Image (cartoon, rainbow, N blue to C red):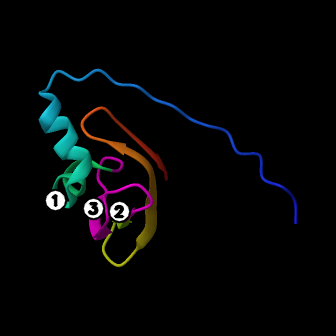
Amino acid sequence: MTAVDLQDFTFIRTLDAPRALVWKAWSEAAALAQWWGPNNATIRVISLDFRPGGMFHYAMAFQPGHEMYCRFIYGEVVAPEGLVFVN
Protein backbone atom coordinates (compact mmCIF):
# COMPACT_ATOMS: atom_id res chain seq x y z
CA MET A 1 0.00 0.00 0.00
CA THR A 2 1.37 3.41 -0.92
CA ALA A 3 1.01 6.63 1.01
CA VAL A 4 -1.55 9.11 -0.23
CA ASP A 5 -0.42 12.69 -0.82
CA LEU A 6 -3.15 14.87 0.67
CA GLN A 7 -3.38 18.55 -0.14
CA ASP A 8 -5.68 21.23 1.17
CA PHE A 9 -8.08 22.82 -1.27
CA THR A 10 -9.50 26.15 -0.19
CA PHE A 11 -12.12 28.17 -1.94
CA ILE A 12 -13.57 31.49 -0.96
CA ARG A 13 -16.66 32.99 -2.51
CA THR A 14 -18.31 36.36 -2.12
CA LEU A 15 -22.06 36.08 -2.60
CA ASP A 16 -24.64 38.77 -3.08
CA ALA A 17 -26.95 37.32 -0.43
CA PRO A 18 -27.59 37.82 3.27
CA ARG A 19 -25.10 35.95 5.43
CA ALA A 20 -27.89 34.11 7.27
CA LEU A 21 -29.29 32.76 3.99
CA VAL A 22 -25.87 31.54 2.83
CA TRP A 23 -25.30 29.81 6.18
CA LYS A 24 -28.74 28.17 5.92
CA ALA A 25 -27.86 26.88 2.43
CA TRP A 26 -24.85 25.05 3.90
CA SER A 27 -26.37 23.95 7.23
CA GLU A 28 -29.86 22.62 6.44
CA ALA A 29 -30.56 19.32 4.69
CA ALA A 30 -33.44 20.62 2.54
CA ALA A 31 -31.34 23.54 1.32
CA LEU A 32 -28.31 21.37 0.52
CA ALA A 33 -30.52 19.02 -1.48
CA GLN A 34 -31.64 21.94 -3.65
CA TRP A 35 -28.27 23.30 -4.72
CA TRP A 36 -25.39 20.94 -3.94
CA GLY A 37 -23.88 18.92 -6.76
CA PRO A 38 -23.52 19.33 -10.50
CA ASN A 39 -26.27 20.55 -12.78
CA ASN A 40 -28.84 17.86 -13.59
CA ALA A 41 -27.96 15.81 -10.51
CA THR A 42 -30.59 14.88 -7.95
CA ILE A 43 -29.40 14.97 -4.35
CA ARG A 44 -31.00 12.69 -1.75
CA VAL A 45 -29.97 13.53 1.81
CA ILE A 46 -29.38 10.37 3.83
CA SER A 47 -28.28 12.16 7.00
CA LEU A 48 -26.97 15.51 8.15
CA ASP A 49 -25.14 15.94 11.46
CA PHE A 50 -23.97 19.53 11.13
CA ARG A 51 -21.33 19.88 13.85
CA PRO A 52 -17.57 19.42 14.17
CA GLY A 53 -16.95 15.71 13.64
CA GLY A 54 -20.40 15.27 12.08
CA MET A 55 -21.26 14.12 8.59
CA PHE A 56 -23.43 15.05 5.63
CA HIS A 57 -24.19 11.73 3.87
CA TYR A 58 -25.97 11.96 0.54
CA ALA A 59 -26.67 10.16 -2.70
CA MET A 60 -26.27 11.87 -6.06
CA ALA A 61 -28.04 10.56 -9.16
CA PHE A 62 -27.99 11.64 -12.78
CA GLN A 63 -30.60 9.06 -13.75
CA PRO A 64 -33.02 7.02 -11.63
CA GLY A 65 -31.53 3.91 -10.09
CA HIS A 66 -27.90 4.98 -10.50
CA GLU A 67 -26.78 6.67 -7.31
CA MET A 68 -23.32 7.62 -6.18
CA TYR A 69 -22.91 7.88 -2.41
CA CYS A 70 -20.88 10.74 -1.00
CA ARG A 71 -20.23 12.48 2.30
CA PHE A 72 -18.73 15.51 3.98
CA ILE A 73 -16.94 15.11 7.29
CA TYR A 74 -17.09 18.42 9.12
CA GLY A 75 -13.98 19.76 10.82
CA GLU A 76 -14.79 23.30 11.90
CA VAL A 77 -18.28 24.77 12.07
CA VAL A 78 -18.19 28.40 13.17
CA ALA A 79 -21.58 29.99 12.54
CA PRO A 80 -21.84 32.10 10.45
CA GLU A 81 -18.13 32.74 9.86
CA GLY A 82 -16.79 29.62 8.26
CA LEU A 83 -16.96 25.93 7.55
CA VAL A 84 -14.25 23.31 7.07
CA PHE A 85 -15.05 19.87 5.71
CA VAL A 86 -13.57 16.98 3.76
CA ASN A 87 -15.71 15.79 0.84
In the figure, is residue 35 to the left or right of 57? left
Which of the marked residues, 1 or 2, is nearer the chain's N terminus?
1
Residue type at mark 3 is: Thr
The answer to whether the residues at label 3 and label 2 have Cβ atoms under 8 Å apart is: yes
Residue in view at x 26 percent, y 40 percent: 79
Residue in view at x 45 percent, y 68 percent: 68
- How far apart marks 3 and 2 lie (CA) works out to 6 Å
Residue type at mark 2 is: Phe
Magenta stretch in the rendered image: 37-56
In what element is the residue under mark 1? Answer: helix
Q: Position of residue 74 (x, y in %)?
A: 43, 54
Residue that extends furthest to the bottom in the rendered view of this protein: 65
Q: Where is residue 10 in the image (x, y as percent from the top left)?
A: 51, 31
- How far apart marks 1 and 2 lie (CA) works out to 19 Å
Residue in view at x 13 percent, y 37 percent: 21
Q: Residue 42 carries which label?
A: 3
Residue in view at x 40 percent, y 25 percent: 12
Residue of label 2: 62
